[in-house]
Amino acid sequence: MQYGTNFPSLRSEVSDAEWEERCKLAACYRLMDRYGMTDMIYNHITSQIPDRSGRLLINLYGLLYKEITASSLVEIDLDGQIHRKPDSAYGINKSGYVIHGCIHRARQNVHCVIHTHTRAGMAVSAMRCGLLPLTQTASRFHGHIAYHDFEGPAIDLEEQKRLLADLGEHNAMILRNHGLLVCGASVPQAFNLMYQLEMACRAQVDAMGAGLDALCIPDEATLARAAHLYQPGTRRAYGELEWHAMLRLLDAEPGSYPSYAS
């Protein structure tokens, strides 16, 4: 067993569909690092294996996001049982399936779940007001974001039913006093949603430095229209167009593309 980061390629051992999904998820981890949405080795992103019902991919608990590759991802089921993992001393983070597994099980339209502990996300999660619709970016979540109260580290399976009840049909959630969570119909869509939620939180933290009396919030009719225009299917598939640009960004970094797709 090793604590290293070099793992034999699984390309010839999995289906084309699974390999493509592994590459997308590994790229997502790299992009989260690229945009400063990481917390050392903590947090997790999961995605469903397209041709393997009830099977998810998740990161080894010990690797940095920028070290994750298609072949280092671990295959687990919805109960957190490991079915394929690299020869590594690292395991998986229990919170990864306590939080993610129940969402994948309950929401058939969810393909990818992302959870973060960013500085801005944690700051907004600790505010009684929650996320304010201060910017065009934040307006996307107006009426489309859930909240779940803090219950301590997410290791208790009993919390799953309360988390699901709070999430409902929303695709974005603020975990009070904890962090952020999003889910999407694909890895690109989930990444786009988390990026926008994170930017909304960063802008709110910056704006609130001027004091609450200085903040300008659009009227309800404007916010409702803006939020509607950002929902899936109203104009375009958010995340898919941006994804190709994001991959070009990774491709331009020396050694990055061969690394995550290995």
Image: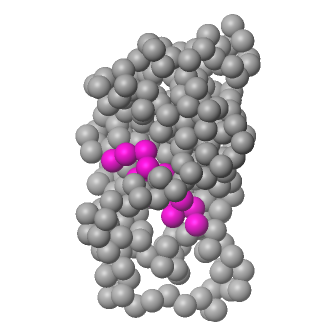
Instruction: Identify the residue at horizontal 57%, vertical 61% (top origin).
Output: 198
Percent position of residue 87, x then y: 61, 10
Residue at 73 percent of width and 17 percent of height: 3
- Residue 49 seen in this snapshot: yes
Q: Is residue 238 above or below residue 117?
A: below
Name the residue located 32 percent from the left edge and 88 percent from the top edge. 221
* Figure coloring: one colour
- State the residue in front, 130 or 185: 185
Tell me which secondary structure the magenta stretch mostly adopts.
helix
Q: Answer above or below: position of 58 versus 206.
A: above
Q: Is residue 82 left or right of residue 208?
A: left
Q: Is residue 243 magenta?
A: no
Q: In the rendered view, would you say 41 is above or below 32?
A: above
Q: Position of residue 179 (x, y in %)?
A: 58, 53
Between residues 159 and 195, which one lies in front from this camera angle? 195
Q: Is residue 253 left or right of residue 195?
A: right
Indicate the quadrant containing the C terminus: top left, top right, bottom left or bottom right.
top right
Q: Position of residue 9 (x, y in %)?
A: 56, 17
Q: Compare residues 232 and 197 and report the one nearer the observer.
A: 232
Q: Residue at x 62, y 92 (%)?
A: 213
- Indicate the quadrant containing the N terminus: top left, top right, bottom left or bottom right: top right
Number of labels in the image equals 0
Does the image show residue 162? no
> Residue 118 sits in which quadrant?
bottom right
In this view, the residue farthest toward the top is 1
Q: Position of residue 68 (x, y in %)?
A: 62, 32
Tell me where the magenta segment starts and ends, as one range: 185-199
Q: In the rendered view, does 77 fall on the left or right side of 74? A: left
Q: Nearer the viewer, residue 78 or 69?
A: 69
Is residue 188 highlighted in magenta? yes
Q: Residue 12's image quarter?
A: top left
